[in-house]
Amino acid sequence: MTHNSKTSPTLGVITALGAYIIWGLFPLFWKNLHSVDATELIAHRIVWSFFIVTPLVAITQGFKEVKSAFLNLHTILINLLTGLMLCSNWLIYVWAVNSGHIVESSLGYFIVPLLNACLGCFLLKEHLRVNQWFAIGIAALGVLILVFEYGHLPWIALGLASTWGCYGLLRKKSVLSPLPGLVVETSLLAPLAVAFLLWRNHQGLGALGHSAVGTHLLILSTGIVTSIPLLLFASAAKRLKLSTLGLLQYITPTSNLLLGVFLYQESFTSQKFAAFSLIWVALIIYSIDSVIYNRKLKIA
């Protein structure tokens, strides 16, 4: 075995941890921009992400993929849809964080794997094992408890889970690798984002030119903050098994939950604890089942 093959999994774990930890600490960043309208923040995030990832694609010689994507109408439409799903996910998350709903947003990312299983079953006709159905049922009970707790559906959590789940589903249909895909997604949405920002500025509502220096710097850094964890994740995905990535991904919502409860003092009642506990049990059952099933496939 070569030295590289030994270190690749280790490097994969390091880069995956980096990505998930940064995503987990995102509330700290967005809370400092609570004075800026969430829709405007997402428009800035799209524009500045485009200016960050485009040179990176040039460096990694990924422009061939980008060029071929714009020559295929089907690829354009798929990536327009993925871009809209990603944009919707960002908008819900930023609004939730800055409106004091970090705990509920963490729930959304806890239930993503279970929702993905449901999407795979009903849309891709994938077969779910008994333990997977059992896990989904337990998670559904947890969500039902939250319905009684909130008095309505936890729409923030369900919105985040569904937009991210649909994004993943549509990305499977795209032929583009992660970085060129992000370039295509942001380039398709950037004209709309720029038009919106110019309109906000014309109305005297835009943050740029009307905010403190610190706010300006944070807004301009949204592209860097967005791109770094995505690049780390792309690097990890090349080196690690999906099952390993799947287990490590819970770092992000766990970090969000801890920040929401202990730093920002959001409500975490006994009913919410019971609901989250059921969802955590569901995730444990689902993860163990996936690991056992993958090992059986290897043996076979």
Image: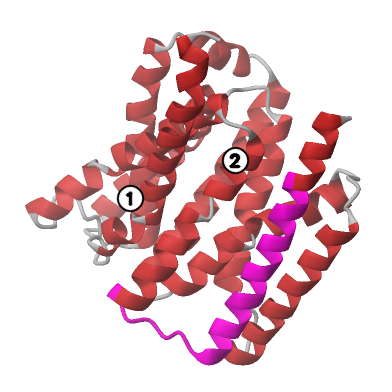
Say left or right for 155 vs 198.
right
For the record, the magenta segment spans 263-291
Q: Earlier in the sequence, mark 1 or mark 2?
A: 1
**Whole-percent x and y of residue 13?**
47, 35
Can you give x and y, in whole percent of width and height, for residue 297 in the image?
Answer: 84, 34
Residue at image position (74%, 79%) is 141
The image quadrant that residue 45 belongs to is top left
Image vertical order of residue 79 relative to residue 122, above or below: above
Q: Is residue 65 magenta?
A: no
Q: Position of residue 253 (x, y in %)?
A: 48, 60
Which residue is tagged 1? 199
Q: Nearer the viewer, residue 163 or 134?
A: 134
The answer, for residue 99, to whether it is visible in the render is no
Question: SS class of the residue under badge 2?
Answer: helix
Amino acid marked by disc 1: Trp
Q: Secondary structure at mark 1?
A: helix
Disc 2 crowd, CA 10 A, few/some/many (<14, 14-19, 20+): some
Which quarter of the figure is the C terminus placed in? top right
The kind of residue on which mark 2 rests is Thr
On the image, numbered disc 2 is attached to which residue? 244
Residue at x-position 57% and y-position 89%: 271
Along the line of sight, the residue nearer the viewer: 194 or 219: 219
Q: How is the image coloured?
A: secondary structure
Tell me the quarter of the image containing the N terminus. top right
* Residue situated in front as seen by the camera: 123 or 70: 123
Residue 115 falls left or right of residue 150: right
Q: Residue 105, position in %: x, y?
A: 49, 67
Q: Is residue 20 left or right of residue 109?
A: left
Cα–Cα span, label 1 and label 2: 45 Å
Q: Badge 1: how crowded within 10 Å, few (<14), some, or many (20+)?
A: few
